[in-house]
Image: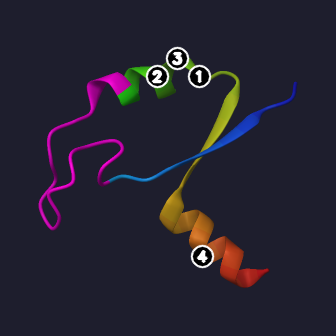
Amino acid sequence: MDYKIIAVDFDGTLCENKFPEIGEANKEMIKYLKDRQETSLFCGLAVLARFWKML
């Protein structure tokens, strides 16, 4: 099966941006991502940035 890779940021994407606090959940985005769990691989942007530096 071919998977899509979806990079997801936390602040401002999965929740409201209230850094350094954690804002309210973005329920619409979370539902969207959950609906794609079986066909996608998810990676947080912080992890992706660290990997990119290693290349």
Q: Is residue 53 left or right of residue 46?
A: right
In the structure shown, which secondary structural element does the residue marked by tag 4 occupy? Answer: helix
- Give the amino acid at mark 2: Tyr
Q: Residue at x 38, y 29 (%)?
A: 29
Q: Which callout, 4 or 2, points at the residue further toward the start of the chain?
A: 2
Say which element carries label 2. Answer: helix
User: What's the residue at 11%, 60% (across, down)?
Assistant: 21
Q: Is residue 30 left or right of residue 8?
A: left
Distance, label 4 to label 1, CA atoms, is 24 Å
| Label disc, if present, on residue 36 of the rendered structure | 1
Q: Quadrant of residue 17?
A: bottom left
The range drawn in magenta is 11-28
Residue highlighted by disc 3: 35
In the visual, does 18 lie left or right of 34? Answer: left
Indicate which disc residue 45 carries: none
Q: Position of residue 35 (x, y in %)?
A: 52, 17
Residue at label 2? Answer: 32
Residues tagged 2 and 3 counted as in contact (Cβ below 8 A)? yes
Number of disc labels: 4
As drawn, 22 above or below 19: above
Amino acid on which disc 3 is placed: Asp
Q: Which residue is mark 4?
A: 50
Sequence-wise, which precedes: disc 4 or disc 3?
3
Asked if disc 1 and disc 2 are in contact, CB closer than 8 Å, the reply is yes
Asked if residue 18 lies in the magenta stretch, the reply is: yes
**Decide: marks 4, 2 in contact (CB < 8 A)?**
no
- Is the stretch drawn in magenta largely helix, strand or loop? loop
How packed mark 3 is, by other alpha carbons closer than 10 Å (few <14, some 14-19, many 20 or more), is: few
Q: CA distance from mark 2 to mark 3?
A: 5 Å
Tell me the distance, in whole angstroms, between the alpha carbons under discs 4 and 2.
26 Å
**Residue 51: x and y, percent?**
67, 72
* Discs 4, 1 touching: Cβ within 8 Å: no
